[in-house]
Image (spheres, rainbow, N blue to C red):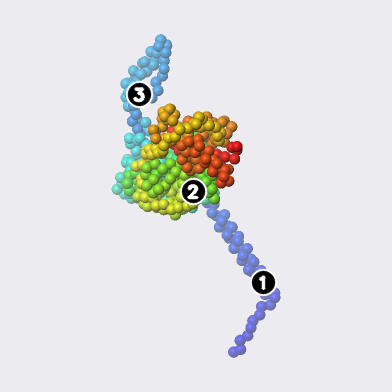
Amino acid sequence: MTAQSVSVPHSGQGTLRALWLTALTMALVIAQALSAQARPDSFADLADKVSAAVVNITTSTVIAQGTGPSPIVPEGSPFEDFFREFRDRSGPGDRPRRTSALGSGFVISEDGFVVTNNHVIESADEIIVEFFSGKELPAEVIGTDPKTDIALLKVKTDTALPFVSFGDSDTARVGDWVVAMGNPLGQGFSVSAGIVSARNRALSGTYDDYIQTDAAINRGNSGGPLFNMDAQVIGVNTAILSPNGGSIGIGFSMASNVVTRVVDQLKQYGETRRGWLGVRIQDVTDDVAEAMELDEVRGALITDVPEGPAAEAGMKAGDVILSFDGKAVEDTRSLVRQVGNTEVGKTVRVMVFRQGKTQNLKVTLGRREVAEGAVPVAQPGGEADEPPSTEMLGLTLSPLDDELRGQLELDDDATGLVVTDVDNLSDAFEKGVRAGDLITEAGQQKVTSITDLEDRIADSREAGRTSILLLVRRAGEPRFVALPVDSEE
């Protein structure tokens, strides 16, 4: 058989093109319809799925009656007898009484582990967990972490309990739907819906990583879960921003990726075990970066190295930590979280910027909980004869002598220059330098005399820098301040 070629007439090609365009249009319409369906018509199915794992928490605490304020009645007042009779009817003033508080929580395992906020159960003598069914069980505290305001409880149960799972909070995007559940204002189980309003909010804690939401959160919601649309817990409702104590659409939930690490440690150890580097740090600012000739405004600037892992590894004040355990360090907050999330006792590689060059150091981390409260090691150094007070950089400076050491309650071996006055119109005043501060370094070199500081300023000008980095100590607390040198004649 002879093969024959088949050709499509021009009109047939037009028909195929039209069919293809129609199919494409229908596909786009279907895609838009599916996208529109991403917004749920109801949250009822989600609520039904997870409500059995959300609990109300009631705590009670015994306090002395006499700890409250008493009315002040002037002697001889006509009300004196009335208040005396009232006190007599009330019984002894120091008779203890029991107070109650309410909160929320959620079950994370069938054997009865419950997560809530630390402030919900703090100082409680008795904790009762009430389930959606109305069943009540006493709970014991397994462990707490005030730094993230998380507590882990345990109830004893003979039957498997409904529970919920944590999701990955890092995947939550601003604008995603979320649902908050809990016991607002003691009204019992309640559901509210909203969106993720913002990410990575920091309130006051070192390890804060809050999801901000406009889902209604009120008093009593504390400790309750924040769910995504996959019925996963991506946050623990912790705080609200409100002028009147009620919800105004600004609520904060501790991100689940923070909570899971804390819960795992509380479950294993009954306490948290965070890594500790052993440095005091501050953020790198534009002027600090310029003074140190850093290419980027990032990293964590070391202001002090007390005795600990960092000191043993050779870290020094003035180093800028650029990476920790292979991860870039953007600022002090990111470093604190990276170190805290690292296993105690692990040896990590830390890259620092020092005197214009980078170098890698190996540090074996300690444990923060053990190290908290450590006193920085005083800086050694000698003492030299000095000229009278000198004005420079908007500061009036005096050499440190025994009299000034006594006035400032400094160690006998402390060295540096004492700020005795600050020009109110100077950059130094704007950056917080005050009388009584002690300058111990300039240009990342020790200064023990006025001449030392003058030499460091001259070196900075000669190198073409417009500012100089000073290490300033106040009540033992160090920080770096960059001051302009181009205004000095």
- Identified by mark 2, the residue type is Gln
**Label 2 vs label 3, nearer the camera:** 2
In the rendered view of the protein, which quadrant contains the N terminus? bottom right
Residue 42 or residue 112, whichever sits in front? 112
Residue that badge 1 annotates: 15
User: In the rendered image, which residue does mark 2 sit on?
Assistant: 355
Q: Residue furthest top?
A: 76
Question: Residue at image x 37%, y 18%?
Answer: 86
**Relative to 357, is 270 on the left or the right?**
left
Q: Is residue 19 left or right of residue 360?
A: right
Between marks 2 and 3, how big is the CA–CA gap?
A: 62 Å
State if disc 1 and disc 2 touch (CB < 8 Å): no
Mark 2 surroundings within 10 Å by alpha-carbon count, few (fewer than 14), some (14 through 19), many (20 or more):
some
Rendered view: 44 above or below 416: below
The answer to which of 459 and 16 lies nearer the viewer is 459
Disc marking residue 66 = 3
125 vs 367: above or below: above
CA neighbours of label 1 inside 10 A, class few (<14), some (14 to 19), many (20+): few
Q: Is residue 161 visible?
A: no
Residue 173 percent location from the top left of the image: 52, 50
Whichever of callouts 2 and 3 sits on the residue coming sooner in the sequence is 3
Secondary structure state at the residue bearing disc 2: loop
